[in-house]
Image: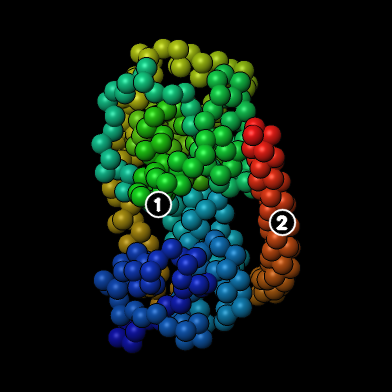
Amino acid sequence: MSNEPLGIYFCGPLKCWGQKSFELSEYFKLLKNSFPVQIVDAQKAAYFFVNETLESRADFFRKRHGNMVSILIAREALSPDFNLFDFAIGFDPILYHDRYLRFVPGYRFKEYLEIKPFNKVEFEKREFCDFIYSNRFANPQRDKVKSIIDSISPVQSHGSHLTNVYGEIDLLTNGFGWQKAKIEIQSRYRFSIAAENAFHLGYTSEKVLTAFAAGSIPIYWGNPLIHLDVNPSRIINLHDFDSEKEFANYVKEINNDSKIFNQIVKEPWFTEAQRKEILDYEDSLNNFLLNIFSLRNPQRKGVGTFNDTYVEVTQSGFNFGRFVVILNTLKNLKVLFFKIKSRIKNNRVRKRSVF
């Protein structure tokens, strides 16, 4: 292999990668240990890293060229399109030769693994259930889960979505950061609603792990294969029940029995096989990237009549769809603005009526 530096381009602005600099990306750092790599402009790059955000994918479509190898990092509930990308890392539980590596959620959110699990919690001192979300545009099933649990006992909603407990999450976030603030609040509850923003096979986010760290029981919905990522005995999985009534009755039973509650809380977060997978994942990621950058010909996506047409049509549809998404977002923000304005006005009226 040539000693010439290998040019890498991260598609999209820095903020959509959640890093202070591209050099701090774990992918760049792993590669730098084995190859002469450098971050360059798109035109000079042999390798494009793309993520799931609209900004990153739009940049990819604008600047892609025939000589580059594309690697999708799908950190949310998005299945990789192998007609567009040569390689991908994502949550989908699939095998595709050397083109794909699945995220191991326990590794992706490994900072939570350092938190010592609860062996026993003070059941009587804990309140019933929390709901901490800000995304108003998630799958409606998330709100439905809250509604089912509300029928048992009122759920305390601390986030900006469906709020009924005001201010505290903001104060704690300013002091500790969002995740620590969330865990601090969840540690006061027996149950935490851990519903993903989408129904998606294989997509497991940090939501169950913050509940584990807080010593509460996650009430889970989103990934029907969640049992592959965490110990199924440590959660209440809505996907396991045949009816909402059966699900609600099970939550009631646990809420009325401290012994059953603590049996669940004492369960390990992961099975032995899952823990081994977490410990092995950094090696798997390293090997996946080393293979890509070692290949004499790393091109994997198809090139030809149907493939090229598909890419062109997809790019055109993406550009139009992105415009529609922006318009809908502005529309939703306008609706939200008037709702907030109306709420402020009503509060002022109520205050005046008191005096």
Mark 2 packing: few (<14 Cα in 10 Å), some, or many (20+)? few
**What colour scheme governs how the chains and residues are painted in the rendered image of this protein?**
rainbow
Q: Residue at x 35, y 49 (%)?
A: 176
Disc 2: which residue:
334
**Residue type at the position of mark 2:** Lys
Horizontal and vertical percent position of residue 228: 43, 38
Query: For residue 185, which quarter of the picture?
Result: top left
User: x, y (%) of residue 296?
Assistant: 40, 77
User: Image point 72% across, 67% down: which residue?
Assistant: 323
Image vertical order of residue 27 relative to residue 127, above or below: below
Is disc 1 placed on a helix, strand or loop? helix
Residue topped by disc 1? 174
**Quadrant assignment for the C terminus:** top right
Q: Please state which of residues 318 and 148 is positioned toward the viewer in this rendering.
A: 148
Q: Residue at x 26, y 44 (%)?
A: 114
Give the side of residue 122 with respect to residue 73, left or right: left
Give residue 169's quadrant in the image: top left
Q: Position of residue 175 (x, y in %)?
A: 36, 50
Q: Secondary structure at mark 2?
A: helix
The residue sitting at the front extreme is: 355
The image shows residue 236, relative to residue 182, as above or below, that is above
Give the mark nearer the N terminus: 2 vs 1. Answer: 1
Choose between 111 and 96: the one closer to the eye: 111
The answer to whether one can see residue 246 in this image is yes
The three-letter code of the residue at mark 1 reads: Asn
Tell me the crowding category of disc 1: few under 14, some 14 to 19, or many 20 or more residues within 10 angstroms, Cα based: few
Q: Residue at x 47, y 67 (%)?
A: 15
